[in-house]
Image (cartoon, grey):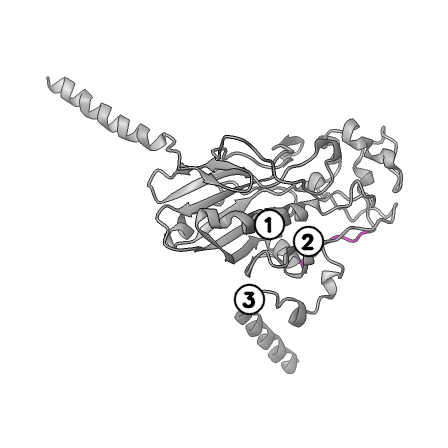
Amino acid sequence: MPVLQRHGKWMILWSLWAAQLMRQPSAPVKVSNGLLRGVLAPDGSHIAYYGIPYATTDSRNRFQGPKPEPKWDGIFDAYNENIRCSQRFGSNKVIGREDCLTLNVYTPNNKNGPLPVMVFIHGGGFRDGSGSPYLYGPEYLIKHGVILVTFNYRVEILGFLCLGIKEAPGNVGLKDQVAAMRWIKKNIRVFGGDPDNITIFGESAGAAAVVYHLVSPMSKGLFNKAIMQSGSAMSPWSLHDPTPTTSDLIPIKWERLKKDDPKAMELNKKLTMVPLWYEDSDPTPTTSDLIPIKWERLKKDDPKAMELNKKLKMVPLWYEDTLKYWDGVYAKYRRLK
């Protein structure tokens, strides 16, 4: 009898542990795509919606901007935590997938009124990264009554290749970000969020992207506040001169792509992503001046020439006091010289 009792206790403990791992679906909510449901966190603190498609891509024209969001019948199970955009991993391995334009929404389980929303833009030098919950979880913000949204955007060649032609205009990764913010603005109320209290924030390349959205007409009205962490559009790595070309990255056995030759887009059919990273992981190298090309930018002005006191007043900047402090230090230093 004691042996049975001991085994019974272990069975109860095992059952309690297994229950923590079981997926507990949430009630369905209706977004612009259709109905979807997420999962309740094991501790019951929040509901997570993973892998919601906010736009689509076209594999036949893979260097174009994002296409409209997909629609569906029935209920979409927002359970997939492992989606990331195609990117290089190590020296010669590619991970991720091209159909990757998804976002994750984390909302407190007990909501009182419309909640503030924070939208995170991941870093990675515009070369890698994702909105993975394993890197950017919601636990801290959930405790403070904030809805968190993270998302993927195309990186590397698929996000920033520019050949100076309409089939590959460049900067589609930034346009993915705009599409994600539009989806959030349109649907966040369904999750208990306030569409008029959205803060975008990013780290490293994500911070540089925040600056681009501050000055881009495409992003106007999609957010209300901004935070930049450890990065800026003024950083030398965040903006490349339009003159260099990525044609040098293509193996020599392929005919070099001409600027105005529509056959250049046979790249879609002939080349895998691995040769596109042939010599360097940088999708916009600064080592070639063979073909002068013009980038299609998110904005008309060069951010290197931005007038900070005029153009960065679109939304409140939470580090304004820090800027004032360093401006004072700089002014004092100049007087001492």
Q: Is residue 137 visible?
A: no
Q: Residue at x 88, y 32 (%)?
A: 255
Locate residue 134 relative to residue 334 in the image: left or right.
left
Q: Nearer the viewer, mark 2 or mark 3?
A: 3
- Looking at numbered disc 3 in the image, what kind of residue is underneath it? Pro
Question: Does dot 3 land on a helix, a strand or a loop?
Answer: loop
Residue bearing the label numbered 2: 238
Circles 3 and 1: CB atoms closer than 8 Å: no
Q: x%, y% of residue 312?
A: 63, 66
Separation of marks 3 and 1 at Cα, in angstroms: 20 Å
Name which residue lies at 51% across and 42% down: 31
Q: Position of residue 113 (x, y in %)?
A: 39, 55
Magenta segment: 233-242
Magenta stretch containing residue 239, yes or no?
Answer: yes
- Within 10 Å of disc 1 (Cα), the crowding (few <14, some 14-19, many 20+) is some
- Which residue is labeled 3 in the image? 316
Give yes or no for contact between labels 2 and 3 (Cβ–Cβ under 8 Å). Answer: no
Q: Which of marks 1 and 3 precedes in the sequence? A: 1
